[in-house]
Image (cartoon, rainbow, N blue to C red):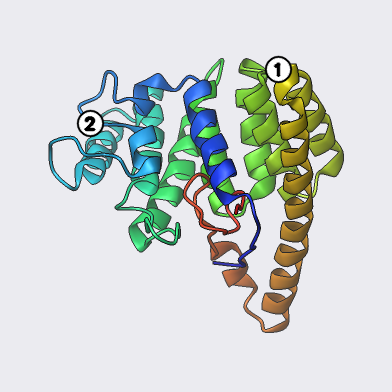
């Protein structure tokens, strides 16, 4: 991992990210609906996938999705299925250490696979990019600490579903990308769309997120400068934070008590 940030809000933000996944409406992958996979993203994130089937269920899902893209690489749906399958794998116990929240080797490969599949999907020039899948790709870019690309991708999801959760996630990623003005604008909309009795809590969370985002920007810049000085610039882009929703005080998402 490129860097590690400690804080006081890990559990709260972990819940926020799980709620984000649910409220963004990705029901196909969240609950395994219309899929041969037992369980879905929520089970993968929370580690509660206790359904039947192979312990390699998420890897098997990726294998099936990859075969489908080989058989029909012009199918937008096949690439969307692969994005979701790769993200599920990264978020599962196969892809993330359930104690530390850090991505395993398989999880890192799945995170890269998530964004690769998303980019192949975009190359097909869909008339209206799938917003539900976009938010998974945004989180995967975030885990790779490619925050500017994460922002661009999250904007697709937010434009389609401009609710409090999507605006909050956009703000979080924008702060990490150093796009403070965009983060402030997104955060303001997140607060406005939050029920009044919860707005103060969201405002506090935004303050923590903005502060952490500034720390992320500094840490990334420092790490890149050190890598360049050591003639290891090619390694600067290969670092990973935990997948948002899986982190234990890491850089891929929020921190907690």
Near-viewer residue (212 or 222):
212
The image quadrant where one finds the N terminus is: bottom right
The image quadrant where one finds the C terminus is: bottom right
Mark seen at residue 36? none
Residue in the picture at 38% in, 27% down: 30
Residue pushed farthest front? Answer: 197
| Disc 1 element | loop
Residue pushed farthest bottom? Answer: 230
Q: Is residue 63 left or right of residue 228?
A: left
Which class describes the residues within 10 Å of circle 1: few (<14), some (14-19), or many (20+)?
few
Residue in the picture at 20% in, 27% down: 36
The x and y percentages for residue 141 are 56, 46
Mark 2–mark 1 CB contact (< 8 Å): no
Q: Which residue is mark 2?
A: 37
The x and y percentages for residue 120 are 46, 36
Mark seen at residue 195? 1
Near-viewer residue (57 or 155):
57
| Disc 2 element | loop
Residue in the picture at 36% in, 21% down: 28
| Residue 200 shows in the view | yes
| Residue 122 shows in the view | no
């Amino acid at each position: 991992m490129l860097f590690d940030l400690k804080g006081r809000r890990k559990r709260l933000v972990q819940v926020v990210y799980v709620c984000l996944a649910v409220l963004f409406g990705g029901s196909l992958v969240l609950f395994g609906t219309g899929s041969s996979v037992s369980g879905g993203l929520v089970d993968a994130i929370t580690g509660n996938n206790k359904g039947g089937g192979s312990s390699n269920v998420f890897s098997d899902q990726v294998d099936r999705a990859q075969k489908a893209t080989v058989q029909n690489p012009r199918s937008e749906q096949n690439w969307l299925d692969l994005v979701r399958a790769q993200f599920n794998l990264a978020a599962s116990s196969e892809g993330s250490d359930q104690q530390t929240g850090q991505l395993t080797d398989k999880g890192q490969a799945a995170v890269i696979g998530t964004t690769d599949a998303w980019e192949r999907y975009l190359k097909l020039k869909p008339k209206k990019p799938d917003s539900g899948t976009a938010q998974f790709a945004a989180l995967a870019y975030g885990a790779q600490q490619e925050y500017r690309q994460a922002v661009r991708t999250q904007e697709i999801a937010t434009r389609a579903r401009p609710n409090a959760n999507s605006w909050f996630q956009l703000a979080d990623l924008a702060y990490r990308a150093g796009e403070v003005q965009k983060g402030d604008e997104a955060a303001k909309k997140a607060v406005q769309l939050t029920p009044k009795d919860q707005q103060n809590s969201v405002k506090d969370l935004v303050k923590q997120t903005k502060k952490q985002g500034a720390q992320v920007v500094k840490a990334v810049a420092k790490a890149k400068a050190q890598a360049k000085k050591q003639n290891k610039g090619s390694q600067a882009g290969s670092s990973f934070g935990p997948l948002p929703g899986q982190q234990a005080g890491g850089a891929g998402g929020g921190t907690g008590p």
